[in-house]
Image: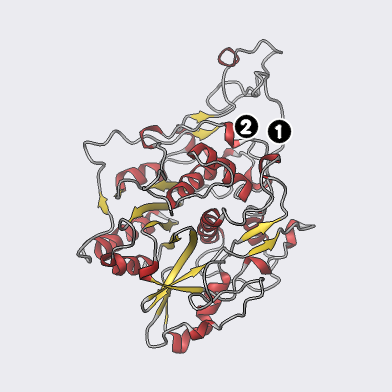
Amino acid sequence: MAGPIMDASVLTYEGISIVPTESYLDFTEPAWVLGKHFLLEDDLDQFNEEVRSLLWFTYRKNFKPIGGTGPTSDAGWGCMLRCGQMMLAQAMTLRHLGRKWKWKPKMTDSTYMMILKSFLEKKDSLYSIHQIAQMGVSEGKQIGQWFGPNTVSQVIKKLIMFDDWSNLAVHVAMDNTLVIEDIKKLCKSSYSSWECYGACTSAKEGGSTAGAVIPNEQCSCGKSVIDRSGNPRRSVNKMGPYKRTQSFGLNTSSWRPLILFIPLRLGLSETNSAYYSALKACLTIKESLGFIGGKPNHAYYFIGFNAHRLIYLDPHTTQPTISPAKYSAIPDESYHCVYPCFMNFAELDPSIALGFYCHTEAEFDDLCDAITQLIIDGQKRPMFEISIKRPAHWPPFELPKRPCDDLDCARADFTELTFDYGEDDRTFDTDGEYEII
């Protein structure tokens, strides 16, 4: 478990008593949850409803082996992966359901169910533990190995490429610098302007002499689609909402909704107290997705604060895998946490990744203004920098390469794929960098 009950208030399924959230709240101070403000004397019910509406992902057991022969449970190693799922799920909720949406028990809303389906413990669920763990191999993390905050950010950035339904852009701001020019270039570019990778290659490049290339089996880049054995690929079964569509032909003047990750290290072995107020300020910004981090070897999803305590969701509960008979009515009670957890700022590991969601360009501009006022100008020691233009000594910004239109995520083994993110593609989470150790 995540820690003694004296340190946390959390609903569990392992015989530990439940301590009411109210006993941990300071009613003389407001509470903030993902940019929303609550005066607890008057807004306690609304506060509890806000927390319950968040999707809560925990360890699961008895799912199908990852990669066919791998683990059947992520207990003990998947906590940061689950935290990444929670942050991403909040962005998906904002993207498809809006900021005013609230969860109710036995809800069967089709859009909500589609979001939840994408996180089930199944290989054909795009954001499942299976897909995240296997994609992590491309970031140097073997299946069953702990992730750091930045690794899970990089993995989400890659998986988002397969999600045409959500049509999201993901930017991971490295080197403690947020470059406005780069993000606007990313969000306003069309997919059709991106090069592709994966199964898309020419017969000559693939070295195949097997069979004739089918003329209409082509990627948008004009090259024929070839499988790993060098044969032309024919029809493939797509993943429901993730089937490739004409959404790649986006107008360059449009804005693709943005998920922004900012990985940071706020100290050497412990978080510098000079950053506490800046962390609080981040959680008051409307576009906030909170941040992922935790204690040594224990990752949490931080969603807010009250007085001197952080509020978080804890993935360290092992629950049975859900295998619904119908995706239109997934039993979802175990995906919502009744009681949040609380932790003093002083206990926070220094490696974190902030998250923000901007549905429109106007929201991104608002976020930049808020960061400038609250995080940069409003702090003696800013956590990171913001720059309008890309620094002259940096290499040119390159758009990421997208997956080939006919690359089947449901069948792909991400341990065999190579991704090209230009000059910004590096291996992170080395010992002593962005790991929770």
* Secondary structure category for the residue under label 1: loop
Q: Does residue 217 show up?
A: yes
Within-10-Å neighbours for mark 2: few <14, some 14–19, many 20+:
many
SS for callout 2: loop
Query: The residue under label 2 is which amino acid type?
Result: Asp
79 or 297, nearer to the observer: 297
Q: Residue at x 36, y 33 (%)?
A: 423
Closer to us: 45 or 253: 45
CA distance separating discs 1 and 2: 8 Å
Residue 77 vertical placement versus 124 (above, below): below
The quadrant the N terminus occupies is bottom right
Q: Say whether residue 259 is visible.
A: no
Pointer 2 residue: 406
368 left or right, relative to 259: left
Pointer 1: what residue? 236
Q: Amino acid at mark 1?
A: Val
**First of labels 1, 2 by sequence position:** 1
Q: Nearer the viewer, residue 198 or 340?
A: 340
Q: Position of residue 178 (x, y in %)?
A: 31, 50
Residue contact between numbered discs 1 and 2, judged by CB atoms under 8 Å: yes
**Left or right of 200: which side holds 366?**
left
Q: Residues within 10 Å of mark 1 (few under 14, many from 20)?
A: few
Q: Position of residue 11 (x, y in %)?
A: 60, 74
